[in-house]
Structures are given as structure tokens and as C-alpha cells.
Image (cartoon, rainbow, N blue to C red):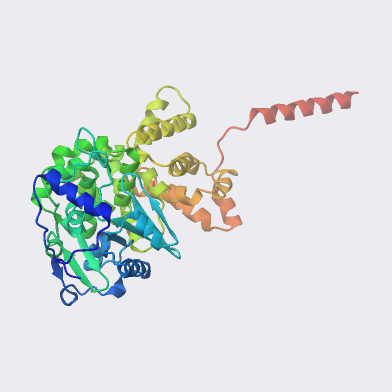
Amino acid sequence: MRPNELYPLTAPLMITRFIGRVFSGRIFKAKQPRIVPFSIHGVAREWISPCALKVTQMLQRHEFAAFVVGGAVRDVLLGREPKDFDIATDATPEEVRALFRRSRIIGRRFRLVHVMCGADTVEVSTFRGGQAIEDVEARLSDEHGRILRDNVFGTQEQDATRRDFTLNALFYDPTSQEIWDYHGGVDDLRKRRLRMIGNPEQRYREDPVRMLRAVRLAASRGLEIEPRSRKPIHSLARLLANVPPSRLFDEMLKLLLSGHAVECITKLRKEGLHHGLLPLLDVILEQPLGERFVMLALKTTDERIRADKPVSPSFLFAALLWHEVLAAWKNIESGNVPAIPALYQAMEQVVQAQAEQLAIPRRFSADMKEIWALQPRFLQRGGHRPYRLLQHLRFRAAYDFLLLRCESGEVDVAVGEWWTRFQRAGEAERAEMLLQDGAPKKRRRRRKRKKRDEGEDVKAEG
């Protein structure tokens, strides 16, 4: 199938395309994509996941267009293994759902279909309409230009134009092993250039999260943001305040778990996008100790991700917000509040303040609080306290957190070394390692002993 051939369109898609032309005031001449053959790009269909191949073949067998699209094509061309394979088609969600027994329609802003193949899931989207379509019921924006709802279907060309960056607007046909390129994405990849499709300022206003995505892609893929695409970012950074906290959290989590978090944070600071996203991103510019601690945490996370080792989002966010907790803890203690109650108040205060910017899920915030709450207990190295701490469910995470604090200079290195040795030591060595417990004995136990002794004296006199 070549670009000058018409796809078999369903009635709703034909009507949508006609309305788009009428409202635009003129009939658009279809833009012809550049067809890049296998002999040039070298991406074989074997590089595509079996589930994605199955879905594209089924759709094409029923005379629908079907392409692997977006980040999967981009990453394969960069020599990286894609995490997900998304498919774009001219079939409506209902038509896709009817072809696959194990599938479901999801989404509100974008209606998509998830097709399951065993443990794998492929996301299938219908070609989206272009900017010329002015269907008020289907497209809704706020006063800043951010799109709130957009369920307009369209053509493949329109779908390519409405995508964010040129290297995300590449369509790969597994059957012909061709790449359809509407906006020069293949050349941009070759030049290691990240370029926005259309007017950058307008596109950032439609979805301010694109500014964060630009930073993440540039840092994690070794790309340079094109000057025209970079220019509006600094002045539009304030628009991130209008993005729902849950979306900001999802994008920040992708950024921090990209395996290139250090580069991402550096670029966020360079583009002026750090203020307000996380308190740490403001604090680290002012506190050398905090910056060292955060960068050590990000570096450790990057190394684990690149080594295919598991990482904990809870641990990472605990590290990012720790110096906010420290500042709040010190402030509350100055009001004559005991240390431990002050720490718990500080933790709650920081988590509540952060919820207004990033909707950190409760399962993460609960683990973060446990890691923070265990830190004072590492200073208690006498009596039975070290043994009880070793049995705690979050000991390992809290211990790794302590080592970061030691390495950054916040805590004496000897404390971390003591706990490292204590874990590995036998019972006899542990007993010798225990420091003298200077904690006061409980008064209740002393009173009971005194009362018992007095009773025995009375009996003796009788």
C-alpha cells in the first residue's frame, strides 16, 4: 500500500475528515510522506514484539491500516530496546475491540484499546484529527490553551501532524518493513536533533507536559533540543502549574527512572523548569549539602537502572524530599517540641505540601515516611535497639538511605561503617560492638522493684 492510495475509511472517519475541511475554510492537499525502505533504515520486523505483529497483521487482514508508531520506532532506530509497542490505525476503538477477544476500551481524554497477548499488552489508537477540526464537543481547552478533551478521529497525516516531536511521528509497517515519515523525523534522528512539530509555543500551551518530555527525551536519548523548539520553554514554564498533579507525577517518575536522571535534572535547571515541581529542585540550588545528597541518590538510581536492577520510587522520592524534611524538623524542634514528635510533624507537613504539586500515591508516601522515621534509630547502638531495627521490614531501604547520608557528609561515616559490620557479624561480635546504652531506665520498673522489696521486708518482720 502506497501513500497515494486511499485507506478504506469508516463512515465516522469520512465525516470527521469532511468537517475538518469545511471548518478550515479550504480543501487540504494531502501531504505525502517520505517512504523510507528497509534497505536504508534496516529495521526488520523481527525487532517488533510478537504481540504488536499479531495486532497489526489482524488489522491489515481486515483491510484496516495498521502501523507501529511513536517511541518504539524512535528507539529501535536509535539501537535501543523499546519498553512498549504502540499501534496506530484507521479502525475505530469499537472496530478494534470487535477483532480481539482479549481487549478493552480505556481512556476519557483519548479513547484507546488495550489488546492483551498473554502477559504482553499493546496499546492501539485510532488516527487523531488535525488542528483544523473545530468540533467543540470533541475538543475542549482551558483559558491557557491546554487541551482538556480531544476525541476527534482523522487521517494518518493528521495523526502525524498532531504528535509532539518529529521523531515520535514515524510509522513503521511490519508487513512492508517501510517507515512512513511525514515531518523529517528520520533526518532529525540522524542529526540527534529534537524538533517540535508545528508552532512550539502553541504546542506547549496545548500540553505543558511536553516541555518536561522534551527535557527527558533530550537527556535520555542524547539529543539536542532544536533552538526554535527550545526558545518558548523558559517563558511558558509557569503553565506547568495548571497541569493536574497526577500527570506531573507520572511524567516526573518517567524522568527520574529514565536511567539518565542526573542529566535530566541538569537540563531541567538549565531550562528553568525545576522551580515548583519538587521542593528539592529549588533547595539544591541553595544548599551544597542537599545538592550532593540528591545527586548521589540520582546517580545510584541511574546505575541500578542501567544494570537492570530493581529500583524503588519510594526510596527515590524519600531522597529527593529529605532536606525539606530536615529543614521542617529543625524548625519545629526550635519550638520546644521533642525530637521524634517534631520529626513526624515535619514528615506530614512536607508530604501534604508536596501533594499540591505532585500527587505522590499513598503507597509511596507511606514507605517514604518509614524510611525517614528510621533514621534517628541508627544512632541508637546500645542494648536491644540494634537487634530490633535489623528485624524491621524497611531496614534495608533505610540502611541504604543512611549510607547516602554518610557519603554526602551529613552523617559521620563511622555510623554507616558500624551498621555495615553489625549486619555481617556473628552473635559474639555483635555483643562486643554494642555501645554503652546511656538511655535512662524506665521509672515504672524501678518503682515496682522498690515496692516488691518493701513487701518482702514487711513479711520478714512479721
Quadrant in the picture for the N terminus? bottom left
Give the quadrant of residue 84.
bottom left
Residue 200 location in percent, x, y?
13, 46
Quadrant in the picture for the C terminus? top right
Residue 234 showing in the rendered view: yes
Give the quadrant of residue 79.
bottom left
Residue 273 location in percent, x, y?
21, 41
Residue in the image at 23% along x and 67% along y: 172
With respect to residue 140, does 164 lie above or below? Answer: below
With respect to residue 278, does 97 lie above or below? Answer: below
Residue 35 location in percent, x, y?
14, 69
Residue in the image at 87% along x and 26% along y: 459
Residue 249 location in percent, x, y?
33, 43
Residue in the image at 59% along x and 43% along y: 383
Residue 205 as seen in the image, left or right of residue 345: left
Residue 378 as seen in the image, left or right of residue 358: right
State the residue in front, 416 or 350. Answer: 350
Q: Seen from this angle, which residue lies furthest top?
A: 335
